[in-house]
Amino acid sequence: MIEMGGCMRILVLAFFLCVSTLAFAQDASQAPRNSAGLSFTAETDHYRVFAETSQTQAEDVARKMEAALVLYNGIFHFDLAQLAAKFRVKVFRDLDSFNAYLDKVLSQKRTDFVFVAWSDPERSELLTFPKEDKAFTASLLHQGCIQFIKGFIDNPPVWLREGVATYLDGSLWDPAAGSFIAQPNLAWLDTLKSIIRGETPNKLIPFADLLTLTRDQAQAQMDIFAPQSWGLVQFLLNATDRSYSRVMWDSIVALDPKAGLDDNSQRALKKGFGWVMDPQLLQDFQAYMLSFKTAVDLVKDGIDLYTNGDLANAELSFTKSLALEPASATATYYLGLIEYSRKNYARAEDQYTKASQLGANAGVINYALGVNSFAAGKNADATRYLTLAKQSDKATYGDRVDALLKRMENSR
């Protein structure tokens, strides 16, 4: 069978665009054993990586997959000694090479990574190709998670497989530590909130149905299944009522490595959710998701608090936003404004500079740096920044810059 999916998030200042592609399995019975053309290899305790690109990339992917395994098993707690074979990963030189191989073995073509699972574990393999770093990591984590789960459970419930894979594919790679840092993956949050609030024609899938969906059934209602399966995993692992984490664990330990999909889905339903399948689960799930704020939500809250003069809580909101989205130029810029309001001019300058590096508007940042430098008594720097602000956006800053430069001149 062939498994595919993944979630890629593209950040634009404080806003993000979510692109998520999910599809499911098709049966297949044979696969080639050779790795012709993939001449670079790297091996770790649990992975064997073949690459057409370079030895460096083979080793890098092997290292990342070994770190990803730690991330995955932090949820599943599988006995790694029970692995039938090392996980196989192939890195093709480009999309064309990737599809040439996929067409040869399955007569198919794809645009994202795929995990091809065969009855013989030694033949199962995750197929990849070079992409932009963030997109590569997200796809690798997502498909790698499915590969990991199926290394121990032949037919895991669809909600569990896809929900956990999506939950983890937003994790960040820390090259210094050689490990992944788990980050909330909020790509589906706004969609799920809209469904819960009744803002779309879509309705939540009853949990008794969600937990027993087949792959085809999930595919047929992907616009609901994808956010709800992710949301369920997010809720079970992070709800304030820690008894819900027991539901997740009971669902996992109930699974039979060799059972069919329907059997394992029923096992998780009865043993994991048997004691919580009532209106309280739905109420708690909805309340949790509606209270969950994205980085954008937190920035909006912070701006409102800043505007109302509540600097302490504004700072807290912007800091929480940056914990979710470290590359937010908007949150960083407002932290600079807060430091300026407190007359911490050196700290304000640091925040404005970071915001500039993150892509903030040049006119906005240069004007803020100019005003900050003037307040700090650094008139030469103030003149330079203000002149740059006027050059960047004369319509917005021309008159304000001229007035401030005149004020500086008169104060000498």
Image: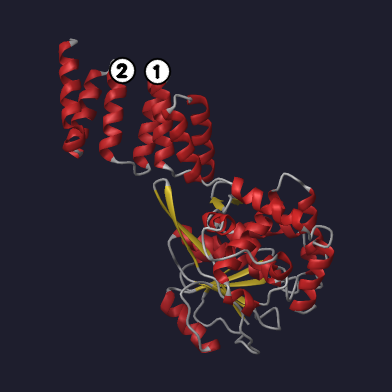
Q: Is residue 325 visible?
A: no
Disc 2 marks which amino acid? Ala
The colour scheme used to paint the residues is: secondary structure
Q: Quadrant of residue 23?
A: bottom right
Q: Position of residue 312 (x, y in %)?
A: 51, 25
| Residue to which mark 1 is pinned | 343
Residue 375 tag number: 2
- Which residue does the image show at 40% across and 31% down from the upper left? 351
Task: Give the residue drawn at x 83%, y 62%.
Answer: 274
Q: Is residue 293 above or below residue 279?
A: above
In front: 91, or 321?
321
Occupied quadrant, residue 131: bottom left
* Residue 3 in the figure: left or right of residue 200: right
Quick one: SS at disc 2?
helix
Q: Residue at x 45, y 40 (%)?
A: 300
- Lateral position of residue 200 relative to residue 153, left or right: left
Q: How far from the left and from the top, in percent, is residue 399?
A: 16, 28
Q: Amino acid at mark 1?
A: Lys
Label 1 close to label 2 by CB (< 8 Å)? yes
Work out whether 5 lies above or below 184. below
Q: Is the residue marked by circle 2 packed among few (<14), some (14-19), or many (20+) residues within 10 Å?
A: some
Closer to the camera in the image, 285 or 30: 285
